[in-house]
Image (tube, grey):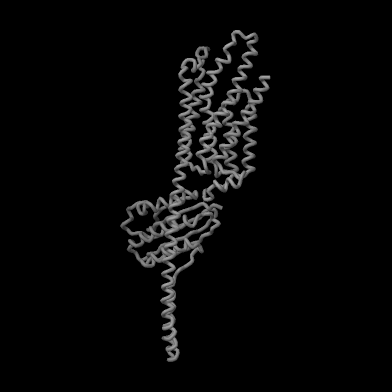
Amino acid sequence: MIKVLLSVFGYLGIIAKVAVFLYLFYLFIPLDLFAKSVNNNFDSRKRATPVKKEDFLSMAIIVMLVQLILWQIPTTTFPISVLGIIGVAVPFSLLRFKDHITETIYVISLWWCLRSVSFFIINTLTNWYSDYLMKDILTASNVEEYVEVRTGIIQISVEIMYVCIIVLAIIPIKKIIKRYETIDWNDLAYLLVPNILGILITWIMISIIIIVVDGTPFILMEQKPELLFILPILALLIYLGTVVALLRFVKSQEAKRTQQLYFAEHLEKEAFENRLQETTRVNEQVRSVKHEIVNHFANIKALVDDGQYEALAEYITNLDVDISKIDSVSYTGNAIIDVILNDKMAKANKQDIIINMSVGFNDAWGIQAYDIGIIISNLLDNAIKAVQDYDGVDKIITFSILSKSPVIIICCENPYSDENKNQTETQLWHGLGLKNIESIANRYNGTMRVERKNGRFMNTVMLKAQF
């Protein structure tokens, strides 16, 4: 009977542990199991897309089967069973949802760490009540059956405790993770520290818990009973380190979103103010032309009546120049971006600076117009400032926004003064502008390159389209 119970609880323990791993996977990686949940919690501006339901279920089935097979092998130890999950989850992630490889690595390390540090608590609890269960062994009529039954009870209780402790440990983590957060490689390096620490300490303790000297086994807990109290405390400290690291990561992500929202709102306000100023300027020009048009027609009539056709042609040519001063241009069809481009073009014209522009924008890119606007504003402001100080005659800025799927490339090129030739690329930039562009580039899994070549200063920003 006890063997049947051991087998049943063994299978249930494996299923429960794999279920915990899959639940952690669900917490940290967006799944389309429930579309509404994903839409509410997943930021569409992030680089990754939700994992398909069939991919997640396939991985779950494979992981479960591998764990059940490994459990049937008598020599299988805890690290081997964990490696079984790593051997399935990581390659599966690389093949089917490689955008989430960092989150997959973190989930595996977190699950492994929770299992590892649980060992210290379970070992202490087992030592406490195993002595009580075995207290009548000397008076038992059937010692073999007595030991078998009580050993089975201990093994069953260990499986139950493992699952209960890990489930309890997940509760604070669930409260911290309120939305899906993209983990980049820098964040991963920070988050892995407490997890790896817990795993390594557990391995070390397991390797020395029983030492054989000259054929005689020495049990560490019997020689150092104080470890039964110290190790659970150490386990709690490692767990708290994991929770604190995760909490700091979530707080930093929230701070980034707040900053991004601030910039977006600030840019929106600035854009509308610029649009108002631009509209006011154009309206004033239109009123001025309308006011003068009556005089123009009178002058034209007079020239026609006098037969002065050459003078009439010259007059009309000058009239065209006057009308061309109404110069609000739609460059992309996006109101926010067009306002910024018109503003920078007007600013450059006042300084006798030419901007050769080739730009476009498509909402299908999945990139916020405000983010593009911040990049445009900073690139052109720095370019105009650099050209103002330039002594050459070719005061020309070349600016472009190109789409080479799946990458959006924003380029700005301008000459610079010889006075700045000894400065580094970063020194030629305004610090805040550089940070803003870097922040946006990182958000869209892109890059920013600043370089000088042949007397010209080149800024290239590449963003990954969020199709």
- Residue at 55% in and 45% down: 99
Q: Is residue 16 above or below residue 51?
A: above
Q: Is residue 291 above or below residue 47?
A: below
Give the mark count: 0
Left or right position of 118 against 326: right
Residue 321 visible in this rendered orientation of the protein: no
Left or right position of 25 against 292: right
In the image, residue 456 lies at what x, y percent?
39, 58
- Residue at 39% in and 53% down: 433
The extreme left residue here reads 419
In the image, residue 382 lies at what x, y percent?
38, 58
- Looking at the rendering, in which quadrant would you find the N terminus? top right
- Give 146 or 74, whichever is nearer the viewer: 146
In the image, residue 111 lies at what x, y percent?
54, 33
In the image, residue 257 lies at what x, y percent?
46, 48
- Give 409 or 53, whichever is nearer the viewer: 53
Residue 461 visible in this rendered orientation of the protein: yes
- Give 400 or 430, whichever is nearer the viewer: 430
Q: Is residue 154 above or below residue 278?
A: above
